[in-house]
């Protein structure tokens, strides 16, 4: 894809999202397309752009990155505000990935507010103990069947090179057996 084509396409998507209260129907691969384009333009250049073409390409990459971030932020905000199940088919895989923990946080907040409003002291006091489950990002080094996490959710099956967020307590044995590599990413 040429630079003018991808810039026009991404700018058009950004403007459509800005001008609509609803999620618009965007290409499912738009973030992958942007990433691939940026990667293709990154090869061959050093860290500091020196020539005019290098400066133009650097600026182009920055613009695409900024526009894609704005698109995602606008779309995630719309999805959170509407919270309708039929919107899920309009979200890209990247947006679903980003949205899932936000929905979980919203559910937890509602649960906490209900407990406070209903005077459920046992629930509130139970939060004093560090019972919260911590999660981490892992990359699978081998295929792995599905399993139940310490949070009672089913995870998997996973295939080699899959990336997943799992409870830390479930990760330890997987690391010890060489099934996963924990990735150093802050949540």
Image (cartoon, grey):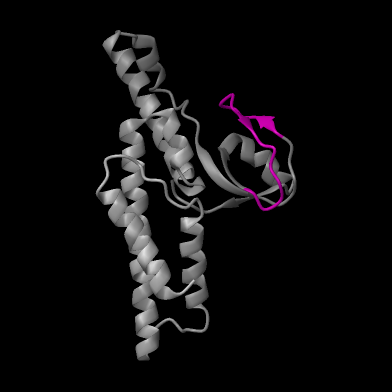
Q: Residue 37, how many percent across, how many down? A: 49, 69
Image point 39% across, 25% down: which residue? Answer: 107
Residue found farthest to the bottom: 51
Q: How many marks?
A: 0
Which residue is the extreme one toward the left? Answer: 19
Q: Specify the quadrant of the image occupied by residue 22.
A: top left
Establish if 162 lies above or below 110.
Answer: below
**Nearer-the-camera pick, 168 or 41:** 41
Part of the protein shown in magenta: 146-162
**150 magenta-colored:** yes
Residue 185 image offset from top left, x and y in percent: 49, 52
The reply, left or right, for residue 156 in relation to residue 32 is right
- Residue 105, quarter of the rendered image: top left
132 relative to 151 in the view: left or right: left
Which of 45 and 36 lies nearest the eye of the viewer?
Answer: 36
Report x, y in % for residue 137: 55, 46
Q: Which residue is drawn at 33% across and 68% down?
A: 63
User: What is the x, y in percent for residue 26?
Assistant: 42, 50
Q: Is residue 89 above or below residue 181?
A: above
Above or below residue 85? Residue 69 is below
SS majority, magenta: loop
- Can the viewer see residue 83 in this picture? yes
Q: Is residue 148 magenta?
A: yes
Residue 49 seen in render: no
- Vertical relation: 152 (above or below) 89: above
Which is more toward the observer, 27 or 63? 27
Foreground pick, 123 / 3: 3
């Amino acid at each position: 894809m040429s630079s003018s084509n991808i810039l026009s396409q991404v700018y058009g998507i950004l403007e459509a999202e800005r001008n609509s209260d609803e999620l618009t129907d965007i290409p499912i691969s738009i973030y992958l397309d942007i990433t691939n384009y940026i990667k293709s333009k990154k090869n061959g250049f050093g860290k500091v752009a020196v020539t005019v073409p290098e400066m133009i390409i650097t600026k182009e990459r920055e613009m695409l990155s900024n526009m894609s971030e704005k698109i995602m932020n606008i779309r995630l905000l719309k999805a959170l505000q509407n919270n309708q199940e039929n919107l899920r088919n309009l979200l890209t895989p990247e947006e679903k990935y980003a949205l899932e923990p936000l929905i979980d946080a919203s559910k937890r907040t509602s649960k906490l507010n209900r407990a406070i409003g209903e005077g459920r002291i046992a629930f509130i006091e139970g939060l004093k103990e560090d019972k919260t489950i911590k999660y981490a990002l892992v990359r699978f080094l081998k295929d792995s069947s599905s399993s139940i996490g310490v949070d009672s959710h089913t995870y998997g099956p996973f295939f080699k090179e899959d990336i997943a967020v799992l409870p830390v307590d479930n990760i330890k044995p997987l690391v010890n057996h060489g099934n996963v590599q924990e990735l150093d990413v802050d949540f």
